[in-house]
Image (cartoon, rainbow, N blue to C red):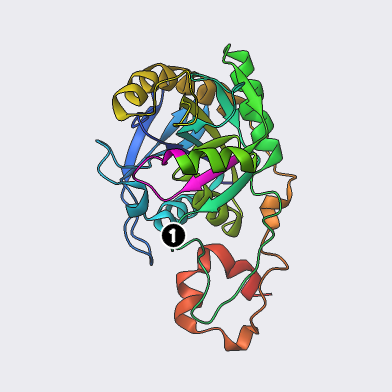
Amino acid sequence: MAERIVGIIGGSGLYEMEGLEVLREERIHTPFGEPSDRYIVGRLGGRPVAFLARHGRGHSLMPSELNFRANIYGFKVLGAEWILSASAVGSMKEAVKPLDILIPDQFFDRTNGRVSTFFGHGLIAHVSLADPTCNILGDVLYRAGQLVGATMHRGGTYLCIEGPQFSTRAESRIYRNWGVDVIGMTNLQEAKLAREAEICYATMALVTDYDVWHENEADVNVEAVVAILRQNVTTARAVLQAAVKTIPEERTCPCAHALRDAIITARERIPETIKRDLAPLVGKYLTQ
């Protein structure tokens, strides 16, 4: 049986994975275009992993330019069953401080027109997204963070905005009133697409700032974010290394069969080109 791969998506500042025994780099071509970069495939803590720099090595892609479908499809082709993600966020809660790590379990979408599904063009599926992250994988990240001494928060809502600009002060105050916990620009589409691909997904929200709502803290800016990121990245690498070692060998969560009852299109009506393009995702359901 082929080894089950753990995917890792590195966000701002996390463009490579220390401790990764590199076996090869792979450029995956997908029906949706090119992923952000080559996947670095190897072993970390004895487990097979595939690492992808979300914004490309050197950070050349802004959030709105990310090809989320290609990134997740590439992980699926490589055989990933789990994805651990890391991203920089602003905190919308006093108790969630810069350098803390929050493991969100909910998302709220404030993006504009990003493609967030593999489906359409003759094949329609509606997966459940009531709980958009994998609870088991979130617990793995949380315990790994505690193990390495990080200040961790389990659960909360990640508000995903379009960017690349940071919030206005009025927006930040309204978001606070909505009760969200952190604000970022990337993770929502990853969570949606990973669920459609039946890949377990959980993310570490690495807190760098208080956005622009906090009266006693400086407003968010790139210089300050980068300074905090340098410290966050060291912690994030340690958490990921610890987490990879403790991911269960077998999946018992609903993520593993999210598409089982989700395809609504009559099989005989699905175009052959779509069947071919989405074979890594739906092939096992279309031959039954």
Quarter of the figure that contains the C terminus: bottom right
Residue 165 colored magenta? yes
Q: Residue beneath label 1, please?
A: 112
Q: Is residue 261 above or below residue 55?
A: below
Q: Which of the 4 image quadrants contains residue 136? A: top right
| 147 sits to left or right of 54 | right
Q: Is 161 in front, or is 81?
A: 161
User: What residue is drawn where x is 69% and y is 59%?
Assistant: 128
Across and down, in percent, residue 189 comes to 50, 53
Three-letter residue code for mark 1: Asn
Say which element carries label 1. Answer: loop
Q: Is 95 in front, or is 52?
A: 95
**Is residue 4 in view from this perspective?**
no
User: What residue is drawn where x is 63% and y is 16%?
Assistant: 146
User: What residue is drawn where x is 59% and y is 28%?
Assistant: 93
Across and down, in percent, residue 48 comes to 50, 35
Give the farthest residue toward the top.
Answer: 149
- From which residue to which does the magenta span run? 158-169
